[in-house]
Image: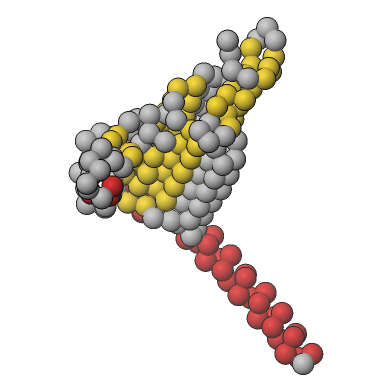
Amino acid sequence: MHLRYRFRRWLGARIRSYRAYLNEVATVGPRDAYASKFLLFGEGAALMAPQGVIYNEEYLSIGAGTLIGPNVALTAGINGDQVMLTKPVVRIGEHCIIGRGSHIIGHWSIELGDRIQTGPYVYITDQNHGYEDPDQPIGWQNPSVDPVHIGSGSWLGANAVVLPGTWLGENTVVAAGAVVRGRFDNHVVLGGVPAKVLRHWTKESGWQSGPRV
């Protein structure tokens, strides 16, 4: 039994080492051939391995120094052969960090500024299912599209959801699990379902509870 345990530890260490090596090799940088498929793949940017679903790269822009975490889905449209009407459909600015397992699913315009960080499993989309016809399945009805903008310096907590039509100002905090839709000023803390302003900042008074009045 002791020998079996020692062998298990030896084998486990080598499997972990090999897996780490594979992930390192599979990480995509700006000088890799795959990076040339993107509209922009900035210097120092990286798609960490293992990558999630990524397609229509020619409509995706990733700024310099931005790190896209493992298993992140990053797409334009609903399939890899779709011709989009805007370019870029998804723009991620410079020096951003997109947490593992997050989804950024664009159809018209999703724009992230610079120095944005997200926790894991954040979901951002600019398209929603329609439900106007009560006699038709929701998935068969025409979707609606509304651009999304996330201001520079913002932080989105784990499992936050950003819905179509959202405009976030700079240095915005979105609490974990919040569902955000609407227009919000700079320097606010959002939380809840639906998300509301929990705190705001002014030059005169600093951080205050609740929304600006």
Quadrant of the image for the N terminus?
Answer: bottom right
Q: Quadrant of residue 141?
A: top left
- The extreme front residue here reads 135
Closest to the observer: 152 or 165? 165
Give the x, y percent position of residue 42.
Answer: 43, 39
Q: Tell me the colour scheme of the image.
A: secondary structure
Q: Position of residue 148 (x, y in %)?
A: 39, 31
Taking the spot 33% from the left edge, 39% from the top edge, the residue there is 127
Q: Residue furthest top?
A: 204
Q: Is residue 72 left or right of residue 37?
A: right
Taking the image as drawn, is residue 144 in sight? yes
Q: Residue at x 44, y 26 (%)?
A: 182
Q: Is residue 13 above or below residue 185?
A: below
Locate residue 131: give its quadrant: top left
Query: Taking the image as drawn, is residue 69 in sight?
Result: no
Q: Report the side of 58 relative to 49 (left or right).
A: left
Residue at image coords 74%, 86%? 5
Classify the position of the C terminus by image quarter.
top right
Q: Nearer the viewer, residue 27 or 210?
A: 210
Count of number-bearing discs: 0
Q: From this view, report whether residue 34 is shown above or below residue 122.
A: below
Residue 52, position in %: x, y? 43, 56
Of 210 and 201, nearer the camera is 210
Q: Position of residue 122 (x, y in %)?
A: 51, 44
Q: Is residue 117 left or right of residue 82?
A: right
Q: Is residue 135 left or right of residue 157?
A: left
Q: What residue lies at 53% left-to-right and 62% top-to-bottom?
A: 23
